[in-house]
Image (cartoon, grey):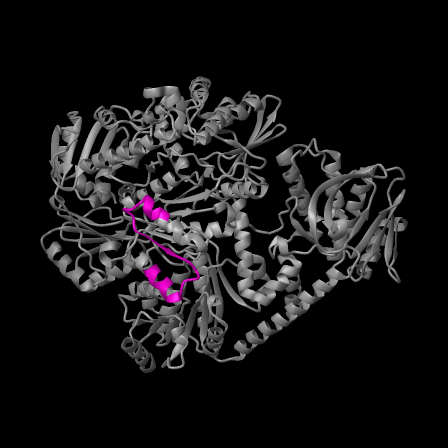
Amino acid sequence: MKALLQALASTKEYRTLMDAYDREVRTISVDGLNSRAMGALVATLRQDLRGRMLVIAPNDSEAREFLDQYAGFSEDAVYIPARELALFDSFAHSRSVIDQRVAALCSLLDREDGMVYVAPVEALSTKLAPPDVFAAGLIRLEVGQTMEISMLVQELGRLGYMREEIVESPAAFSVRGGILDVFPVDRAEPLRIEFFDDEIDSIRSFDPESQRSVEKLSAVRLRPATEFVLNAQIAEAIINKLDKRIKKKNLDEKYLAHLEEVREAISQGYASDDHDKYYPLAFEAAYSTLMDYFGREDLIIILDDARVHDRYKMTYEGFFENFKNYLESGRTLPEMAQRIPALNQMFDHMRHTRLLTVDALIKRTPDFVAGERVKFETMESAPYYGKMELLITDLERWLGHGQSVLLALSSESRRDNVAKELQNAGLFVDVYRTEAPELKPGRASVCLGTVAAGFQLMSARMTLLTDREIFGAPQKRRTAKSKSKGQMIKSFNELTVGSLVVHESHGIGRYIGVDQLTVDGLKRDYIKIGYSGDDFLYVPVENMDTLQNYVGAEEASVKLSRLGTAEWSKAKAKVRKAIEDMTEELVALYAARSKAVGYAFAEDNDWQKNFEDMFPYEETPDQLRCIEEIKRDMETPKPMERLLCGDVGYGKTEVAIRAVFKAVMDGKQVAFLVPTTILAQQHFNTMQNRFSKYPVKVEMLSRFRTKKQQDKIIDNLRTGLLDVVVGTHRILSKDVVYKDLGLLVVDEEQRFGVRHKESIKKLKAQIDVLTLTATPIPRTLHMSLSGIRDMSLIEDPPEDRYPIQTYVVEYDASLIREWILREVDRGGQVFFVHNRVQDIDRITARLSEMMPEVRFDYAHGQMPEHKLENLMISFMNHEFDVLVSTTIIETGLDMSNVNTILINDADKMGLSQLYQLRGRVGRSNRIAYAYLMYQKDKVLTEVAEKRLKAIKEFTELGAGFKIAMKDLEIRGAGNLLGSDQHGHMSQVGYEMYSKLLEEHVRKIKGETVEEQFETTIEFSINAFIPDDYVANSDHKLELYKKIAAIRDQRDRFNIEEEIEDRFGTLPKPVYNLLAIAHVKAMAQRLGIRLIREGEDHVIANFQHNERMGIQVVAEASAVYGRRIAFNMSGKPYFKYKFSQPKLTKEDKAKELETLLLKIISMNTN
């Protein structure tokens, strides 16, 4: 967009502005510049000025709008979000805003010329550490540097990093001997720093999921993980003040206990982002604001200074109203009044820099006396909503008057389509592959560009038009990938002490722990499993692959298996039979549909391509793959039956709408079936909006339509005047007849009753069917069913909406009032989740008494369906402010105005419930808040503590998130396979069920499924992980799982490398363990059941000898001569004599490993 910036820079107004700047006029006022042109002005100033710029907007929404507009001209703006000035204390909260603010402060310390910073005025309302104190918190590390590991641990603590057992998410670190892992807040991957004595020996980045090193680095810089940077002086000052306050004991009891916890943490050198509220105790009135990070020659740009003033005043007064309440109730300290800069102090700070105030309308500036006023004349570009004839008429007029017009389109296809239309109309058009190098009077320039919105600059006789004006659709926005904060679950096989496990041969037991036993003088580690009747099973760690975590029914309803009985084998046989019955039915249906002759849709036409190009976001890879899979099905004569799975907000609706459009383009009708009236209305609105520029007739058939309207819709379906009908089960009625139905889309089929499911089945017979579900399906199940069930999965997360700030806090009526009023004051609405029907009316009445100015209503699942739907519609129409509800809040509903959710007794809910409830907010252009509340008892039960810990992890997508996803996926598996299969799954656990299912599907496909057997290695050698090498039991268990999963030589070397990478040089017992695990894996491949060590030989007994061909026996005999002897009849075995008579145990293991590798290579040649 350089050509546009050059046009702006050449205007008389801009030259006047620059002249005033060069004359060192400290305050310049710019009027008449609309918000859409602001990004262009700042980008132009950035080219011409030295120093940095801070753009201050009246609120978060306008700050982000400016960022969007500025990004079309330049990409290096840094956003500084506002931080909640919370006086309350939380058990846990999400970090996204803190990470952004810390990154911005670090960037400011770099003092890089030309950097542009953007902030809502509320971002200035938090006092900060002075720049020199914050700068002292940056740690630079390089290979060869002398530093004690204990010193680095201390430094990380004072910078707000938390010590964990394993590093998976930002702001965490862990120590194992001379190795320190740390996850810096500004990096996508954590770092592994290895020490040799007091010297840094190496620095490597590593993958948080595999824990393997990725890349060697020579030097790194660690930023603070919080705005609160601790040093000895600050710690001492805060502790002294806290001691005085604690001694007085004139504070609320709980707050006093919290202060003691804070004092303890700070005295031990641990900073936390929740501690920054105690900064006033160290600095009192002297600590800094954001403005202290800018110098005299930096430029502060205030967008609409009157509104910025009013907003800051409102924030300031709101804080003090809250502060007064907290102070009176003994829940804060008097010094906390210093946390927010006073109004006059903030604007005095601004007057000491270069200042530019910008208003769209000419008005007097209340806080700043302008030394120079510059008046621009700009207008917003008018929208055309795809009506090219109107656009062409305006272009003819503008170009005829010698104006220059720039049309910046966000995709090549949009650019080419528009250029073709204008050229066909006989206009003077220049088309550019990327940017337009210049703007020519009387000509239109069509190019690629990602400016959010257009404007007209009168003095430059220039008009900018973008996707928004031409099509009424915003530019294609990239779906941003947020940096990984922990991994989504890949397998459910994660053992924890006390959890239920499934052993392939012995059934369901309880994992007790890892026991080290000494047998015949040899140490080995065993997995101890408890069974019914106080029986125990000790599983050698190298056989851990025979164990899986039990995932299925609620733990209380699961019965432990009895050892030494046929109980488990009978349960497996019963489940196997149920799987056979289900898969036979699926295969029969699949075969029948394969033979059926449906309709083969034509390939995409130009309208289809144009329609898809109008989608305002860049599709995720998964969306594109799913669209391709669905279209491929539609274009074959076999009737499609495909299941599309993806979480709420992952873009399933858009994928379905493209299939709908494709069907209509081929002259077919489409029925879109949904479970509720509200969802019908929502899908109807979405399709009306997407199809508005095309000759596609859409209607909705539900109880929202009168009898007369319904009769007309049904008649239009019968005669073919209607293309698409969206509706509830009403569209399954016998009186609804289609002229030529080609596609049925079913949303959440599992939510329909038996009778409706039968009607759906009849409707499916000869047409293409696409079923949507928002419950995730496990990938393992997806793989198991491939070939007998067509499924498409959208696993890519949705674009990064504004972050949901999640707090885990103690229930407090005054806080609830504060949170609800804040949301209502900004024009938003609130969900209050209370999951008890019996007193939901009383809770609603109590809340209403606390806030008479707020409108409340309540909803629960025992209400009549019509009443519930009417209530939800009233809420969607903003007829009241707060919905008090049980957990029935409709999934899939897009309530973009609801951006605060309060969840009562969150510790009593499942994590998957919390995950789904939290996802009901944060779907708009505002920061959303989720408050997970718990009733704090005097003594919390162990179970409640565990839940709170899990919820705390959940705020950062850590282990708690994995549990939530696991729970959801199991529910998804049940929905997909039906309630009967869900029951069978519970009997043996999900992993075992999946294994049996996969085996049976392979049999159906004609693949060989070999008998499963266990290989035993009887080898007298110390093979275990010593405590002094890996002290943490969870780490040890994780390594045992990986070692048990060794399948070949590559696996063996990979895990050896990983262990050495993470824990240092391998001790002998670990090396032996790897050798034995590798021997066991190779023995399994060769069909060997048992390997027994003798004094100078080993004997290997086969389970079956089909895996050893006669040529292998001959070749091995030729290579090893008399040292190897095979007996392949009766009970087959071979005997191998070691190369030397008195080998060490380790050398014997090594030689055995080499022997089996050699035999396997013979077997594969």
Q: Which residues are magenta?
A: 846-873
The answer to which quarter of the image holds residue 519 is top right
Q: How many marks?
A: 0
On screen, 972 above or below 404? below
Q: In the image, is 386 to the left or to the right of 160?
A: left
Q: Nearer the viewer, residue 505 or 475?
A: 505
Can residue 1077 be seen by looking at this rendering?
yes
Q: Position of residue 894 (x, y in %)?
A: 36, 57
The answer to which quarter of the image holds residue 822 is top left
Q: Position of residue 770 (x, y in %)?
A: 45, 69
On screen, 239 above or below 716? above
- At x 45%, y 44%, the residue is 932
Quadrant containing the C terminus in the rendered view: bottom right
Quadrant containing the N terminus in the rendered view: top left
Query: Is-magenta flag for residue 857?
Result: yes
- At x 40%, y 81%, the residue is 734
Query: Is-magenta flag for residue 907?
Result: no
Q: Position of residue 1074 (x, y in %)?
A: 72, 42
Q: Position of residue 8 (x, y in %)?
A: 18, 41
Q: In the image, is 215 to the left or to the right of 280?
A: right
Q: Nearer the viewer, residue 1106 or 1002?
A: 1002
Q: Nearer the viewer, residue 338 or 644?
A: 338
Can residue 115 be seen by looking at this rendering?
no
Q: In the image, is 938 to the left or to the right of 46?
A: right
Residue at the far left: name it.
401
On screen, 885 above or below 180? below
